[in-house]
Amino acid sequence: MESSKMSKKEKSRQKIMHAAKGLFERDGIENVTFTQIAEEADVCRTTVFNHFAGTRELMLAISRQEIEDIKQYCSLHNMKGKTLVYGLYDKLIDDTVCYPVLTGKLINNAIINHQDDNPVKIIEEMTEEGLRAAGKKRAEELAVLIEGAYFGLTNHYHINDKTFDGKIMKEEFHKLLDYILSREEI
């Protein structure tokens, strides 16, 4: 949502989520209090609680916002077919690079919690949609492989203490994606 069109309440909510993401990444989710988030967002603690009942609700809101941002990015750039798949994961990698630890925790949290608007499921559905539009007959299987390649790449970076560099990660992911999409038998 464009900043100038947001209500004061929505701007406050966005500030809180942005502050929380930075603190969660730096200090760990379990080590951050709503008081710290309020100070970082330059709002009072009550305002944080007016928007979010607890850390779980805040985490879900951050996940939902990330997915909305990705959807808007893909829509704004009119991405369809294979372009949608590449663009979707490029944007996801951009977000991962900014908050690698938090992104991993958000994804794991989304996988474990089976909410209706599960961000991981939405990413998978968007991937399938792009693959179907590109004429891929086994879109569901390909989507699983592609999503697995993203998780595998980010986990590879975490376990090997590699620097999360967006350009390099995109190049590596594109090679994986090209390989997956080139398989005739799939």
Image: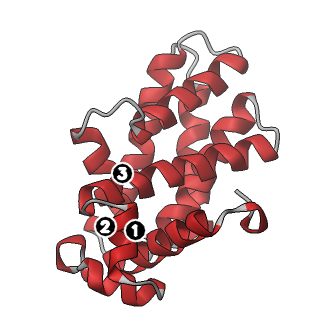
Q: Is residue 48 something one can see in this rendering?
A: yes
Residue at position x 24%, y 76% in the image: 28
In the image, 151 versus 27, the foreground residue is 27
C-alpha span from label 3 to label 2: 23 Å
Q: Position of residue 157 (x, y in %)?
A: 37, 65
Residue tagged 2: 158
Horizontal side of 112 relative to 122 (left or right) equals: left
Please tell me which of labels 3 and 2 falls first in the chain.
3
Q: Position of residue 8 (x, y in %)?
A: 62, 69
Horizontal side of 166 relative to 5 (left or right) equals: left
Amino acid type at circle 1 is: Pro
In the image, 107 versus 165, the foreground residue is 107
| SS at circle 3 | helix
Please tell me which of labels 1 and 3 falls first in the chain.
3
Residue tagged 1: 100
C-alpha span from label 1 to label 3: 17 Å
Dot 2 crowding, Cα within 10 Å, few <14, some 14–19, many 20+? some
Mark nearer the viewer, 3 or 2? 3
- Residue farthest to the left, as pictured: 30
Residue 66, numbered circle? none
Above-or-below relation of 143 to 26: above
Q: Position of residue 118 (x, y in %)?
A: 39, 36
Dot 1 crowding, Cα within 10 Å, few <14, some 14–19, many 20+? many
Horizontal side of 131 relative to 18 (left or right) equals: right
In the image, 142 versus 71, the foreground residue is 71
Mark nearer the viewer, 1 or 3? 3
Amino acid type at circle 3 is: Leu
Quarter holding the N terminus? bottom right
